[in-house]
């Protein structure tokens, strides 16, 4: 996995970004956003189930700001490599919270708590720019989204 470094390496791989994803509901949105991580071998499908289960048990805490959800779960044996993916949805999805509707779902998988904290911090820094979500929504294709999230 390519991680963010001081040298400016990519934080999200080219094959881990999706634009125009069509999801039936929030569970489907998480599954579709996480699909590149499963395909890359970074996580097992059970990690996707754990992300969904976390929201079912704890509520939509992953919807960090209007329009944006950061799906994640605790590190576990179903995470093989720390990785990150992002999907811009083609339609609004409701998580049942004040920050609905959601149009961007990012999935975070980390092998340990230290990298989990570091990656969360890197995502939070991007989100400090209150135009970041709207700029992701404006991306016409995967190339543009890739370039934006790795800028």
Image (spheres, rainbow, N blue to C red):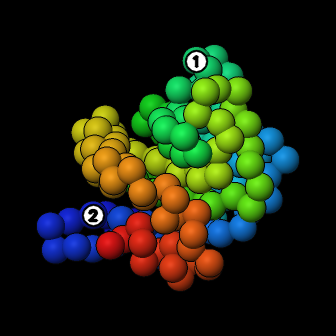
Q: Residue furthest top?
A: 57
Q: Which residue is mark 1?
A: 58
Number of residues whose C-alpha sits closer than 10 Å to that of mark 1, classed few (under 14), some (14–19) or many (20 or more): few
Residue 135, position as x, y percentages in the image: 49, 65
Above or below residue 124? Residue 40 is below
Which image quadrant: the C terminus? bottom left
| Residue drawn at point x = 47 percent, y = 48 percent | 108
Residue 82 lies left or right of residue 98; in this view the side is left
Q: Which mark is residue 70?
A: none
Mark 1 residue element: helix
Residue 52, position as x, y percentages in the image: 66, 33
Q: Residue furthest left?
A: 6
Q: Nearer the viewer, residue 81 or 60?
A: 60
Residue 111 lies left or right of residue 97; in this view the side is left
Q: Which mark is residue 4?
A: 2
Mark 2 residue element: loop
Number of residues whose C-alpha sits closer than 10 Å to that of mark 2, classed few (under 14), some (14–19) or many (20 or more): some
Q: Nearer the viewer, residue 14 or 151?
A: 151
| Residue drawn at point x = 16 percent, y = 74 percent | 7
Q: Nearer the viewer, residue 145 or 15?
A: 145
**In terms of sequence position, does the residue under pointer 2 or pointer 1 come before the other?**
2
Residue 125, position as x, y percentages in the image: 28, 50
Q: Residue furthest right?
A: 24
Residue 8 lies left or right of residue 56; in this view the side is left
Above or below residue 106? Residue 138 is below
Residue 75, position as x, y percentages in the image: 43, 36
């Amino acid at each position: 996995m390519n991680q963010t470094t001081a040298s400016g390496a990519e934080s999200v791989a080219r094959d881990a970004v999706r634009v125009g994803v069509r999801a039936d509901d929030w569970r489907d949105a998480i599954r579709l956003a996480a699909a590149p991580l499963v395909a890359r071998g970074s996580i097992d499908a059970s990690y996707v189930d754990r992300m969904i289960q976390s929201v079912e048990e704890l509520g939509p805490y992953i919807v960090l700001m209007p329009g944006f959800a950061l799906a994640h779960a605790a590190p576990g044996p179903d995470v093989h490599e720390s990785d990150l993916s992002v999907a811009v949805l083609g339609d609004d999805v409701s998580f049942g919270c004040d920050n609905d509707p959601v149009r961007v779902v990012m999935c975070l998988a980390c092998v340990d708590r230290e990298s989990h904290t570091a990656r969360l911090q890197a995502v939070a820094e991007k989100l400090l720019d209150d135009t970041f979500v709207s700029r992701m929504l404006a991306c016409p294709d995967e190339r543009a989204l890739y370039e934006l999230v790795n800028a």
